[in-house]
Image (cartoon, rainbow, N blue to C red):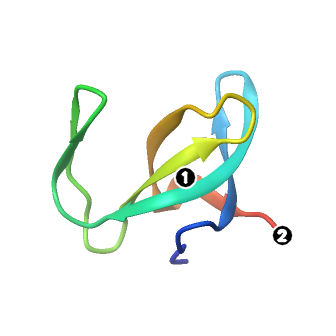
């Protein structure tokens, strides 16, 4: 499932489920927060922003779930 900027999503963390929104889709290799990421054609990365903390993270599409 493809996501668009502003879509509400959730993802799993060691503390449980986290909710936030999509900020940006990444389909080519990029660096974020000091780490290198290499998206695959069928599993792009998304930069997401946490509703709770406002912090941003990179997650594969396969790790995200759509929220209504």
Residue 9 drawn at (x, y percent)? 68, 58
Q: Residue furthest right?
A: 68
Residue carrying label 1: 63
Q: Residue at x 20, y 52 (%)?
A: 38
Left of 66 or right of it: where is 29?
left
Left of 19 or right of it: where is 63?
left
Instruction: Specify the label residue 42 is tagged with.
Output: none
Q: Residue at x 62, y 34 (%)?
A: 54
For the N terminus, the image quarter is bottom right
Q: Residue at x 37, y 66 (%)?
A: 43
In this view, 58 is above or below 45: above
Residue 5 drawn at (x, y percent)? 53, 69
Mark 1 to mark 2 CA distance (whole Å): 17 Å
Q: Quadrant of residue 58?
A: top left
Q: Nearer the viewer, residue 6 or 46?
A: 6
In this view, 2 is above or below 27: below
Residue carrying label 2: 68
């Amino acid at each position: 499932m493809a996501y668009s900027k502003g879509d509400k999503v959730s993802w799993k963390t060691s503390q449980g489920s986290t909710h936030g929104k999509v900020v940006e889709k990444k389909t080519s290799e990029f660096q974020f927060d000091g780490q290198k990421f290499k998206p695959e054609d069928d599993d792009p990365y998304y930069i997401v922003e946490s509703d709770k903390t406002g912090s941003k993270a990179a997650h594969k599409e396969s790790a995200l779930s759509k929220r209504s």
